[in-house]
Amino acid sequence: MGLHLLIRTTMKWSKYNILSKSDKYGHLLFNTMSMVFLQINDEDLPAWLELKSNPDKVSEISNGNFLLKSRIIVKDDDENLNVYLTDVLKNRYNSSDLALTILPTRGCNFGCIYCYEQERPMINMSEDTEQAIIRFVKSNPNLKRLSVVWYGGEPLINFPSIQRLSEAFIGMGIEYSAKMVCNGYLLTEDIANEIERLKIRNIQITLDGIADIHDKRRPLLGGQPTYEKIMSNLKYLLSVNHSVTIDVRSNIDRRNMDEYHTFYEEFRKEIPDNRVTLYPGFVSDLLSDECVSAEDNISEGGYKAQFALDIFNRYGIEIKAFLPKFRRHSCVASKYFAFVIGPEGEIYKCWRMVGNNEQTLGNVRSGLDLAKFSRYLVGADYTRDPKCLNCEFITLCGGGCPLVRLRNKEEGLTLNHCCPEKSHMEKLMEMRYEMTLLAKKNK
């Protein structure tokens, strides 16, 4: 008995190591805490398995320091988790960074088939509300960096508000940058010429497939087509602004998923500019079954991961958003100094709640209701969830959607908030390795 007490392993094979067998590339090792990714040759596998069984042997290995620094071998996984959580909390409560999503309007010129905002009143922001937002921003004495996402509705319906607020933010003498989420239809030459001056660095627009498919899913309110106008606007913007990046999102469900590769290939032929990134989003029924029916919904993580794998294996289309990525938070709803501001100055924590009066957390004129505000930060905090703390995917997930977590807690639901990688990790690792090989080959 005493002898056993003396023989004690001081090092451990990290629980964040994922060792998988790829049919194409042999064994792959990924550490979700350090993000280190390795390919292991067949002849080296026995040594790795021996190290896994007896991690104290790390001191006898020539590259032992690398294994320690990459946290493949650790003294205590809890220490690494604590460092991660400390970083999460520091970032969450950092008062020098402010992130705002601002809706200059709830109005929209589109009649998308999956829109959940159609019943919400169309309101444009007033100049009085703009001034209240400016005062709200200036009320933080520690502010050094401000990032803004212009959102809607369709934000370009009220472009003058974007202009006036942008000029005010730029004039504050702090670090400032902005993005915009728009449908692209109103991105006219006059507006495109203003984008760089207003420090809008990135624009997300949505194209749901080739012209015929897109125009059925995202027409104007009167039913008129929109695809060709959006493409023309994109081409002009890219020609006059050489620093902007464009994210082209395609909202995917079972009605258009099989045609995504056709759209991707045709778009790349027409606009090959590498400043444009294409990626799929997934229509969710999180708020309403009018967004997408149950039989058409593929927004659950496992379906999304399988879609990414299929589109890569069949057509060689890389969807980098599905590669393992380090995350502190799943979205700004879990950060203290991050707010969604509606066109009347109302404050929310989630953009899905805009227009829902019961979900407002206050107003830029009157301040915050801290009881409601804390629901998102603390009421559904993944850093206090034992299931998340014990999960090797915590650094890839950031706890998942805070709204889903809240609904599960408050409504007794069991919606899945885990990251897509959790259900298909080994195949996603294989895809990542193949993409790495392709990138090296194409250099």
Image (cartoon, rainbow, N blue to C red):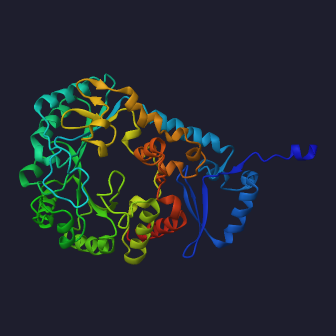
Does any portion of residue 94 appear in the rendered image?
no
Point out the residue furthest to the left here.
190
**Residue 121, position as x, y percentages in the image:** 17, 43
Q: Report whether 236 appears left or right of 134.
A: left
Please tell me which residue lies in front, 286 or 82: 286
Please tell me which residue lies in front, 388 or 25: 388
Does any portion of residue 108 appear in the rendered image?
yes
**Residue 266, position as x, y percentages in the image:** 23, 74
- Is residue 46 shown above or below 403? below
Please tell me which residue lies in front, 274 or 345: 345
Please tell me which residue lies in front, 417 or 195: 417
Which of the image's four quarters has the C terminus? bottom left
Residue at x 93% of width, y 43% of height: 2
Residue at x 34% of width, y 38% of height: 349
Count up the numbered dots. Answer: 0
Which of the image's four quarters has the N terminus? top right
- Is residue 90 shown above or below 61? above
Q: Report whether 428 appears left or right of 126.
A: right
Q: Report whether 138 appears left or right of 88.
A: left
Residue at x 48% of width, y 46% of height: 412
**Residue 89, position as x, y percentages in the image:** 48, 34
| Quarter of the image where one finds residue 23 | bottom right
- Is residue 245 shown above or below 92? below
**Residue 135, position as x, y percentages in the image:** 21, 24
